Image: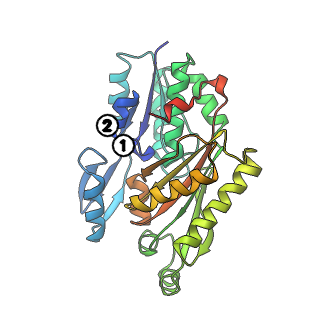
């Protein structure tokens, strides 16, 4: 049985990486000043941030049903079945659309709702690819990804409150007060929901808060205080140097973990939080006999 893995660009997997990994990535569409762009196809990270700095009117969307089904149909000419991993249903309707569309494929397409986004969604795609390589079928892979859906956390701090205010996630008054007091909120994503977690006055304090939260998750939730069996990853929005420094700090604390990657956050997240953000994520490794392997994250 030949099983293909499909995800979307919310995972942070670029089109180039997708080809190298043997994973299919659907680009997420954006509307900028009334014109539609596709992430990493007709819109680069650099171009996106330029438009963001210009205060362009940017809104996110989901791939059209036609786009999704056209790709599935093309893939099924060479593969027997598909595991499709969209971003969390709590954050986008693209998951519900995929679930609905998959009903017409007689089980050949298994749409997964494992409540992930960004670098944790990326890890789900890598795990799915590894499981497929080990001989697991699409239905088994979907069930395993949904079973382990709660085994991840993301903590993120933003450099500016401007974009949270613009998106209606905080009130103008709260944004003005927060900016005056130089507050850097720390947010969390668990189970597909974006929630407030804590507040800090400096990026250094925010990083300390995120690292403390990560340590508690590793100890209490994952039962893996040294991160021997947990993926740790860093993500950022136009903040590469800070991300590299964060990786070095985390690697010194958790030398037994695997490679710690530092990837740009997907544009669908970036447009809501703006440049300068920094995030850390933890995802519990799947049981080795279920096909999860460190070699995929080393590629």
Residue 249 visible at all: yes
The location of residue 23, given as percent across then percent down, is 41, 30
The residue under the point 40% across, 30% down is 21
In this view, the residue in front, 97 or 256, is 256
The mark closer to the camera, 1 or 2, is 2
Residue position marked by numbered label 2 in the rendering:
16
Above or below for 156 versus 283: below
The residue under the point 45% across, 71% down is 159
The residue under the point 42% across, 70% down is 163
Q: How is the image coloured?
A: rainbow
The location of residue 113, given as percent across then percent down, is 56, 39
What is the secondary structure assignment of the residue under circle 1? loop
Q: Is residue 148 left or right of residue 44?
A: right
The quarter of the picture where residue 272 lies is bottom left
In this view, the residue in front, 293 or 105, is 293
In this view, the residue in front, 174 or 296, is 296
Q: Is residue 65 left or right of residue 205?
A: left
The location of residue 167, given as percent across then percent down, is 43, 68
- Count of numbered labels shown in the rendering: 2
The location of residue 122, given as percent across then percent down, is 49, 41
The quarter of the picture where residue 194 lies is bottom right
The quarter of the picture where residue 237 lies is bottom left
Residue position marked by numbered label 1 in the rendering:
63
Give the crowd class for mark 2: few <14, some 14-19, many >=20 residues within 10 Å.
few
Residue 96 visible at all: no
Above or below for 29 versus 159: above
* Sooner in the amino-acid sequence: mark 1 or mark 2: 2
């Amino acid at each position: 049985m030949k099983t293909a893995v499909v995800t979307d660009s919310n995972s942070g997997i670029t089109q180039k990486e997708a080809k190298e990994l043997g994973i299919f990535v659907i680009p997420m569409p954006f509307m900028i000043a009334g014109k539609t762009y596709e992430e990493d196809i007709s819109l680069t990270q650099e171009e996106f941030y330029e438009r963001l700095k210009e205060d362009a009117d940017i809104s996110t969307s989901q791939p059209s049903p036609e786009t999704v089904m056209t790709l599935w149909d093309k893939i099924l000419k060479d593969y027997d079945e598909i595991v499709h991993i969209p971003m969390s249903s709590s954050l986008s309707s693209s998951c519900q659309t995929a679930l609905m569309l998959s009903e017409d494929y007689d089980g050949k397409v298994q749409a997964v709702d494992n409540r992930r986004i960004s670098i944790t969604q990326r890890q789900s795609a890598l795990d799915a690819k590894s499981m497929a390589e080990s001989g697991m079928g699409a239905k088994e892979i979907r069930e395993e990804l949904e079973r382990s859906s709660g085994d991840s956390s993301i903590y993120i701090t933003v450099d500016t409150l401007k974009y949270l205010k613009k998106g209606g996630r905080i009130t103008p008054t709260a944004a003005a007060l927060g900016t005056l007091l130089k507050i850097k909120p720390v947010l969390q994503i668990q189970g597909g929901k974006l929630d407030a977690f804590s507040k800090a006055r400096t990026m250094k304090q925010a990083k300390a808060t995120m690292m403390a939260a990560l340590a508690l998750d590793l100890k209490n939730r994952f039962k893996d205080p040294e991160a021997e069996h947990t993926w740790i990853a860093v993500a950022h929005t136009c903040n590469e140097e800070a991300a590299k420094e964060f990786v070095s700090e985390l690697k010194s604390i958790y030398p037994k973990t695997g490679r710690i990657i530092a990837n740009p956050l997907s544009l669908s997240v970036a447009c809501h939080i703006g440049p300068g953000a920094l995030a850390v994520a933890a995802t519990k490794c799947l049981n080795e006999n279920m096909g999860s392997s460190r070699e995929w994250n080393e590629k």
